[in-house]
Amino acid sequence: MLTIAMPKGRIFEEAADLLRKAGYQLPPDLDDSRRLIIEVPEENLRFFLAKPMDVATYVEYGVADLGIAGKDVLLEEERDVYELIDLKISPCYLAVAGLPNTSVDEVAPKVATKYPNVASSYFREKGEQVEIIKLNGSIELAPMIGLADRIVDIVSTGRTLKENGLVEYETIVDITSRLIVNQASYRLKDKEIGQLVSRLSEIIAEKAV
């Protein structure tokens, strides 16, 4: 049985739809389940539902053979896993944002983010010294209350930024969800994984036409 770690929410729904289009018979209530472990024995699949930031950890340590994770998570976590294919789902991007028409602290601008590793690397490559403030949620609040000069966060439609009076300053990287694999599983279950990758790749190619 192949075990796949996936985050709940939009990525899970889009990934389940992709698997169905690839011919996998998944139960119709799969997307609405509150269970954390879901088995689909007729397809020899088991799903773990995890926090987005934890998916790559499950895969690295081998409790899941495969995982579906956003590129933002893979860049931030830097886990020892193989990235197999870009599933082309849940597109968004990481951006630098803040209040409009505001200058930053010239000595060491404060940047609030859920992605401290990505943000540090980005500003370091630009030759800019910043102070990173790690937050776990409501990142948009930081510049509004004076905690930070800028934020680095995921942007999908830009609606959340706009509703909170913030503007984008720079795009860091485009993000989509990727299929990742545990290194040992890739060797031991190469036939099953190869078949899954082949079927998904065919559907992704069809969507791109």
Image (tube, rainbow, N blue to C red):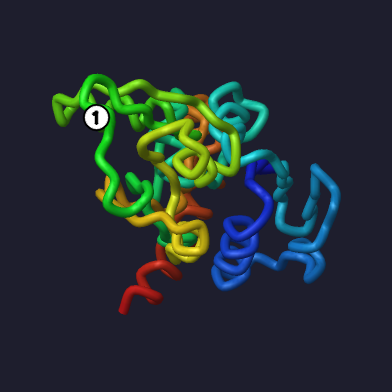
Q: Residue at the location (59% across, 33% down)? A: 136
Q: Residues within 10 Å of mark 1 (few under 14, many from 20)?
A: some
40 displayed left or right of 90 = right
Query: Which of the two residues, 170 or 172, is positioned nearer the viewer here?
Result: 170
Determine the residue positioned at 35% across, 21% down.
131
Residue under pointer 1: 123
Q: Secondary structure at mark 1?
A: helix
Residue 52's spot in the image, x, y percent?
Answer: 59, 41
Residue 152 spot, x, y in % from top left: 39, 40
- The answer, for residue 123, to whether it is visible in the render is yes
Horizontally, residue 14 falls left or right of residue 124, namely right
Q: Quadrant of residue 91?
A: bottom left
Horizontal arrangement in the rendering, residue 96 relative to residue 10 (left or right) = left
* Residue 88 picture location, percent across and down: 41, 61
Compare residues 164 and 8 and report the one nearer the observer.
164
Residue type at numbered disc 1: Phe
